[in-house]
Image (spheres, rainbow, N blue to C red):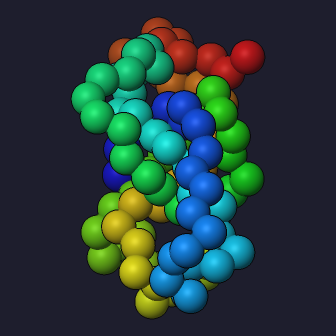
């Protein structure tokens, strides 16, 4: 699993039929402070995340193991919205 920051939404009217009804969000990798890096990627949202949320993402075959994404053609899934992160007793990120 990895940490990401939702930076936007993805609209795709033409897509694989199994993906219909699934919210696709645009995400950037994030560090323990919530700072972003790298190239954006698309993840299926299973927890009603939104733009600005720091999230937990699972990838690969694990992404197809949630109730929502079972056997779907997906590679990245948002499985949690992070409220806070703590490292070595210090809070590095707190939502809001």
Image mark count: 0
Residue 1 seen by the camera: yes
Q: Is residue 18 above or below residue 69?
A: below
From this view, report whether residue 37 is shown above or below residue 39: above
Residue 50, percent across and down?
A: 69, 40
The residue depicted at 62 percent of the width and 17 percent of the height is 94
Comparing 83 with 74, the one in front is 74
- Residue 18: quadrant of the picture: bottom right
> Which residue is pictured at 61% across the width and 45% down the height?
9
In the image, residue 37 lies at what x, y percent? 30, 23
Which residue sits at x=38%, y=27%?
30
The reply, left or right, for residue 39 in relation to residue 55 is left
Q: Is residue 90 above or below residue 83?
A: above
Q: Is residue 58 left or right of residue 86?
A: left
Q: Nearer the viewer, residue 29 or 33?
A: 29
Q: Quadrant of residue 75?
A: bottom left
Q: Is residue 69 visible?
A: no
* Residue 44 in which image quadrant: bottom right
What residue is at 34 percent from the left and 62 percent from the top? 59
Could you tell whether 51 is left or right of 57 in the image? right
The percent coordinates of residue 62 (x first, y second) are 36, 72
Task: Work out whether residue 42 or residue 77 is closer to the camera in this orientation and state it.
Answer: 42
Q: Residue furthest front?
A: 14
Q: Identify whether 54 is placed above or below 90.
A: below
Which quadrant of the rendered structure holds the C terminus? top right
């Amino acid at each position: 699993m990895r940490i990401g920051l939702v930076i936007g939404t993805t609209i795709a009217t033409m897509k694989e039929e199994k993906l219909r009804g699934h919210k696709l969000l645009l995400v950037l990798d994030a560090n323990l402070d919530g700072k972003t890096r790298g190239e954006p990627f698309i993840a299926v949202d299973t927890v009603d995340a939104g733009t600005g949320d720091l999230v937990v993402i699972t990838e690969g075959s694990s992404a197809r193991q949630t109730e929502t994404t079972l056997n779907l053609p997906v590679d990245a899934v948002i499985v949690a919205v992070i409220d806070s992160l703590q490292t070595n007793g210090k809070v590095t990120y707190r939502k809001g």
